Amino acid sequence: MLDIKFIREHPDLVREGIQKKGAADSVDEVLRLDAHRRELLQKVEHLKSHRNMVSEEVGKLKRTGKDAATVIAEMETVKNQIKSIDDELRGVEETLHGFMLTIPNIPHPSVPVGTKPEHNQEVATWGEPPVIDFKPKPHWELVEKLDLIDFERGVKVAGAGFPVYKGQGAKLQRALINFFLDEGAAKGYQEIQPPLMVNAASATGTGQLPDKEDLMYVATKDDLYLIPTAEVPVTNIHRDEMFTEQQLPVKYCAYTPCFRREAGSYGKDVRGLNRLHQFDKVELVKYVHPGVSYNELESLREDAEQLLKKLGLQYRTLLMCTGDMGFTQSKKYDLETWSIGQQRWLEVSSISNFEAFQARRMNIRFRPRGDGKPEFVHTLNGSGLALPRVVATIIEHYQTPEGKVIVPKALHKYTGFEIIG
């Protein structure tokens, strides 16, 4: 959520940011409601001041034995007026808050303006595709041949997008999770095991509500949401809390299953492991001082990129354009690995700076050194990493002519085997 004072003082800048993100413009309604709210506040404060004066006058009259009936009647009238305005004020503030939740975060000046994938900027590349002298197979053919993943039985148990991992496939999953968590710990991230469901307040805090309801699974009887990413429960851990400046940055990593409805996905995008309804991911989350948040973003990006380097996977880093980076982000990078079996890039991580947008929704602040006025922290997160497409890339990248798969050296101590098949 943006600061109402910022919207009031820079409406054109906010409108420009909304336009760049392709969102609905509700700035005029926010300003109208804000002006009405301030008008009501002024009225009610004036009436409360008048009520206090009348109350003092009643006391004086009673102490001197004079008739206070007329003044008491006046005070009752003022009391009713205050109640009426307070009731109206609550309604206006509730409506204003609802509109405030519809205004997206403002893109950082360094973010390219655009609405299509070709408007994203490639800012870094690493590695080379494997040199092979045979036609590479896509991962879905290899996992079936090697009996690593059973898609059909997953459909029987739950539906499409819920695969069953088996044998060495399941061990590869576990190996990657442990590798990612250990690497996060080595970088100073504290491991967290959060709930897999969140309430509406938590989903609103990180921006899933009221923007992404249709993408989440809902436990309707209990009004709970299955998490689409560990970002949601982990960032909400410190909702309504105050850090000291000395505590910052606070860094967490968490492994969780993630649940996404992925409505509207079809074709090659959903083949094999490309797009699932349930998948595993390790998430990296930071709470940082506003003055260093963009340095921390680059550090977070480096932490995620190092994982791909240690796995020996070719990747590229994209700076996402304004229309392709989401409602809540001020700046976002995507990491994509090269799928040699599909001859296309696959996203395996998103790394984002939200500035104070989430923190203001969740009321997460810090007190500066010297006991200064509390400020909102900046929140950042990134996938470190999402497993399905990493698994797909590993299987395709390290396939042999015999249809086996070489396990990356970094995973040997976790898998206990060096060859799959």
Image (cartoon, rainbow, N blue to C red):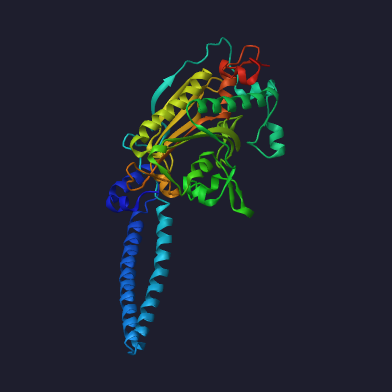
Taking 74 as reference, is 306 above or below it? above
Residue 87 coordinates in the image, percent (x, y): 42, 69
Residue that appears at 55% across and 11% down: 132
Q: Is residue 335 shown to the viewer in this render?
A: yes
Taking 419 as reference, is 60 above or below it? below
The one nearer the camera, 103 or 85, is 85
Residue that appears at 50% across and 22% down: 308
**Count of marks overlaid on the render:** 0
The one nearer the camera, 252 or 255, is 252
The one nearer the camera, 306 or 26, is 306
Residue 139 coordinates in the image, percent (x, y): 61, 23
Q: Split into 4 quadrants, where in the image is the C terminus?
A: top right
Residue 409 coordinates in the image, percent (x, y): 57, 15
Residue that appears at 35% across and 87% down: 68
Q: Is residue 120 shown to the viewer in this render?
A: no
Residue 108 coordinates in the image, percent (x, y): 34, 38
Taking 103 as reference, is 171 above or below it? above
